[in-house]
Image (spheres, rainbow, N blue to C red):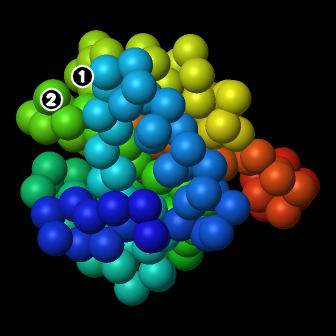
Amino acid sequence: MVGYYHGREVRLRHAAAESYRRMSAAALADGIRLVPISGFRSVAEQEALFFQVAQAKALRPEERAAVSAPPGYSEHHTGYAIDIGDAQFPQWDIQEAFEKTPAFRWLEKNAARFGFELSFPRGNPQGVSYEPWHWRFVGDRHSLETFYRR
Ligand SMILES: [Zn+2]
């Protein structure tokens, strides 16, 4: 458990959670309050989100996949991915504008020290839309193999 977002628990696998807590404390020492928005999601939770997002944005099926991974394919199923916000700018949670926040700039500079990397930078080879809020833990062998051994 790394925190709550609108009353819902945000959970990560143990190693990722420990590292996230250390990262969050380091950010706080620099005056930045990171907000854990969403961590581990079950296939059922992803399914609900996938269809909610698609309906809210009235997307065609082929557009959906770019916005939110289809159920079963989200990095959130691994327990290593986390969406992060800036407590000062809640209106930019899960928005591309998150990249303008001090939290994002801090993460760009420091997340690697805690084993976190941006999953979907601009122009990523997977063709997923740019998600400045979505980070994944690759700081131990199991997590690294989860994302890099195909
Ligand atoms: Zn995410």
Q: Is mark 2 within 8 Å of ligand 1?
A: no
Identify whether 3 is placed above or below 119.
Answer: below
Pointer 1 residue: 97
| The one of 46 and 90 positioned closer to us in this rendering | 90
For marks 2 and 1, give the CA distance.
10 Å
- In the picture, which quadrant includes the C terminus? bottom right
| The one of 13 and 54 positioned closer to us in this rendering | 13
Pointer 2 residue: 89
Q: Amino acid at mark 2?
A: Phe
Residue at x 14% of width, y 63% of height: 6
Could you say where residue 132 lies in the image, as x and y percent from the top left? 42, 30
Q: Total marks drawn?
A: 2
Secondary structure under tag 1 reads helix
Local crowd size for mark 2, using a 10 Å CA cut-off: few (<14), some (14–19), many (≥20): some
Identify whether 119 is placed above or below 57.
Answer: above
Identify whether 145 is placed above or below 45.
Answer: above
Residue at x 53% of width, y 66% of height: 12
Could you say where residue 5 lies in the image, as x and y percent from the top left? 22, 60
Could you say where residue 127 lies in the image, as x and y percent from the top left? 56, 36
Is residue 111 toward the left or the right of residue 25 in the image? right
First along the sequence among labels 2 and 1? 2
